[in-house]
């Protein structure tokens, strides 16, 4: 057997050890390749929207490639630390330090090659399905048919070949074999009882508690100002949480006989403090990476919901049309065009129109909109609002509101105005009506009889509105045609809500799509790191439970201990990340005065579900390995 064959066989003999490293590298390659397939797709060659999609995907490739580099480098370093005993055996058999470096170089190169080939292969298998999903998510207005992505294959293979080649050289260059005696006894050397400072443990509570308190209390622009100091404080607190507080709590629990001697807790706590201390940096990194992924996806999803809600709440009607100056000829032509297009697209709509009249009122700088209560109620009926009730000699101030904001402008300030009448008297508003029926945020509602006594308005604008319950597809098509034929860019007099949502989602879709993929890469990579750290102690666990089984440990007790141990090590950083993420999204909602509770729950459930599935898979194989040694 040649040395090269020895290195290759060594990889296949350690499939369990390299599984997480290989699969995560494969997944990173597949995601990179998927973005390359999109970026080089023939349908993304023209048009501003599709070009922006291509730019977003290309940017995402750079981010994923950079993350893959640091992830692979970290994973390789962690693998080498667990193989000290193996290296010692090889050196004792006569392997030189140069041969040891060459072996590691060839092993890493082999894993990288198969991960690259496998990632590209899986990308090709699922390319059509992913293209269909992207076609609906991105909303680019064109079909993403399957094609042979030669450019994407070449780019992906070249990029990751260079990545794994560089990391192989780098790892081999910095590898230090160490003394033989240290390598051989690496697993038998006592680590000493982990120690934790109660003052640093208390500092964790102060750092994270103060960071949370500031994040949850500040609002508006102060959220952005507090972002950097809060992040620094919480990150520092998270580090001490795993290095100090977790060890401190475990030691306190071990000192309580009622806890330590209860059932199988002795087995659970015997080396838990060692593991928490050994894995502290890993848990810290996983918690921070998962927090970034959770917060990023939650933020993107929250922004999308925020913008969609803004358009829906701002514009109560399906279509509105207004002329800044009354022009009967243009008005008739364009209103007829709107009705014609709606009929052509099969859209059934109710419509109303009125004249928006503005009067100069003492105490108000600009002309103020004043409408008849009968006109107001006709439009209110279209959107299901209750009619306004105004006394014959009274008036009501309009407070323009919706579900997102309490009020754009308070209507209370208009109650101090006095409306001059032709009779020589004046009228003062005596009530405030909250509504989003009118297209403006300030105005008054008066009875029809009072309206006739206002005199001649200083400005008037025709206002039309259409309301339809037809499908969004029909309204989008109608809005697209009308926006091209009516919207000349000079006056924003035409607005179609469904078409505006379509344009928003088409523009925001690439950002959300890219963010989701990158977030998933981060999260799955974090889970893979936990998988490796768990399996790195498998041999020690086999020896420990083999010895304990001889003393009468039952299979049910073994499963309970392993379930508790795996769950604590697997979910500790994830739970911390989820709590951090919830606080971050809450702070974001305070910044925009818009609750992201529903969006936060959706993202939380998705991440939790993924992690639970991952846990059960890892748990099954881990327990199977332990039982095989008994």
Image: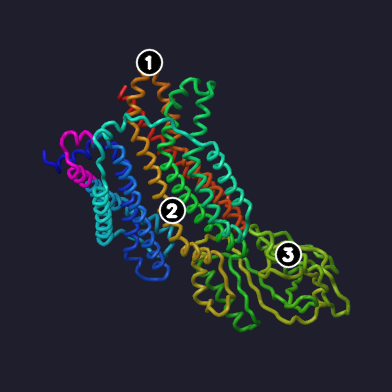
On screen, residue 139 above or below 493: above
Task: In the rendered structure, find residue 516 and report the number of the disc placed on it.
Answer: 2
Mark 3–mark 1 Cα distance, whole angstroms, equals 77 Å
Residue drawn at the location 31% of the way across and 63% of the way down: 40
Q: Which residues are magenta?
A: 88-107
Mark 2–mark 1 Cα distance, whole angstroms, equals 50 Å
Magenta region includes residue 216: no
Q: SS at mark 3? A: loop
Residue drawn at the location 26% of the way across and 45% of the way down: 175
Looking at this view, name the residue that lies furthest to the left.
1
- Residue 437, by quadrant, is bottom right
Residue annotated with mark 3? 410
Q: Main secondary structure of the magenta part?
A: helix
- Residue 443, by quadrant, is bottom right
Q: Is residue 346 visible?
A: no
Q: Give the mark, 3 or 1, whose residue is nearer the N terminus.
A: 3
Residue annotated with mark 1? 551
**Left or right of 520: which side holds 81?**
left
Q: Nearer the viewer, residue 466 or 345?
A: 466
Q: Give the mark, 2 or 3, whose residue is nearer the N terminus.
A: 3
Q: Nearer the viewer, residue 588 or 315?
A: 588
**Left or right of 457: which side holds 569?**
left
Q: SS at mark 2? A: helix
Magenta region includes residue 93: yes
Q: SS at mark 1? A: loop
Q: Quadrant of the N terminus?
A: top left
Mark 3 neighbour density, 10 Å: few (under 14) some (14–19) many (20 or more): some
**How are the residues colored?**
rainbow
């Amino acid at each position: 057997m040649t040395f090269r064959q020895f290195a290759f066989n060594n990889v296949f003999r350690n499939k369990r050890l390299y599984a997480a490293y290989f699969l995560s590298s494969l997944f990173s390659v597949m995601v990179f390749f998927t973005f390359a397939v999109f970026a080089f797709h023939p349908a993304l060659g023209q048009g501003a929207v599709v070009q922006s999609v291509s730019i977003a995907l290309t940017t995402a490739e750079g981010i994923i490639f950079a993350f893959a580099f640091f992830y692979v480098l970290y994973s390789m370093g962690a693998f080498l630390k667990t193989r000290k005993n193996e290296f010692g055996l090889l050196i004792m058999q006569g392997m030189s330090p140069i041969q040891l470096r060459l072996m590691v170089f060839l092993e890493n190169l082999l894993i990288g090659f198969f991960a690259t080939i496998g990632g590209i292969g899986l990308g090709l298998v699922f390319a059509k399905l992913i293209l269909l999903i992207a076609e609906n998510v991105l909303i680019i207005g064109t079909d993403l048919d399957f094609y042979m992505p030669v450019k994407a294959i070449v780019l992906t293979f070249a990029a990751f070949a260079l990545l794994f080649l560089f990391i192989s050289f780098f790892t081999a260059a910095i590898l230090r074999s160490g003394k033989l005696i240290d390598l051989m006894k690496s697993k038998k050397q006592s680590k000493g009882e982990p120690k934790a400072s109660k003052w640093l443990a208390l500092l964790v509570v102060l750092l994270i508690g103060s960071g949370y308190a500031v994040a949850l209390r500040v609002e508006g622009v102060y959220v952005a100002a507090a972002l950097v100091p809060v992040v620094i404080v919480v990150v520092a607190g998270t580090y001490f949480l795993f290095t100090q507080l977790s060890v401190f709590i475990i030691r306190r629990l071990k000192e309580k006989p009622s806890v330590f001697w209860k059932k199988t807790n002795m087995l659970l706590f015997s080396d838990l403090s060692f593991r928490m201390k050994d894995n502290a940096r890993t848990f810290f990194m996983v918690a921070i990476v998962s927090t970034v992924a959770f917060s990023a996806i939650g933020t993107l999803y929250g922004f999308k919901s925020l913008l969609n809600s803004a358009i829906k709440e701002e514009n109560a009607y399906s279509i509105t049309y207004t002329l800044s100056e009354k022009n009967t000829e243009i008005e008739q032509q364009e209103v007829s065009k709107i009705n014609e297009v709606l009929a052509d697209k099969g859209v059934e709509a109710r419509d109303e129109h009125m004249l928006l009249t503005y009067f100069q009122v003492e105490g108000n700088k600009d002309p103020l909109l004043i409408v008849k209560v009968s006109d107001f109620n006709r439009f209110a009926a279209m959107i299901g609002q209750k009619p306004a009730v105004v006394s014959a000699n009274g008036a009501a101030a309009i407070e323009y509101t919706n579900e997102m904001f309490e009020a754009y402008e308070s209507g209370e300030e208009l109650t101090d105005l006095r409306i001059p009448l032709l009779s020589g008297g004046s009228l003062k508003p005596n009530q405030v009506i909250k509504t989003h029926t009118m297209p403006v945020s300030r105005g008054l509602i008066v009875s029809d009889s009072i309206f006739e006594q206002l005199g001649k308005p200083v400005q008037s604008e025709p206002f039309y509105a259409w309301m339809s319950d037809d499908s969004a597809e029909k309204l989008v098509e109608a809005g697209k045609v009308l926006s091209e034929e009516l919207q000349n860019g000079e006056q924003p007099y035409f607005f179609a809500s469904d078409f505006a949502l379509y344009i928003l989602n088409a523009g925001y879709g690439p950002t959300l799509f890219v963010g989701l993929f990158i977030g998933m890469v981060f999260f799955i990579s974090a889970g893979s790191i936990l998988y490796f750290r768990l399996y790195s102690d498998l041999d020690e666990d086999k020896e420990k439970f083999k010895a304990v089984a001889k003393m009468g440990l039952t299979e049910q007790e073994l499963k309970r201990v392993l379930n508790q141990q795996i769950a604590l090590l697997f979910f500790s950083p994830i739970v911390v990340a989820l709590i951090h993420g919830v606080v971050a999204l809450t702070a974001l909602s305070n910044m925009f005065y818009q609750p992201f509770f529903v969006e936060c729950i959706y993202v939380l459930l998705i991440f939790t579900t993924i992690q639970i599935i991952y846990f059960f898979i890892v748990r099954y194989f881990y327990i199977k390995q332990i039982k095989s040694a008994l």
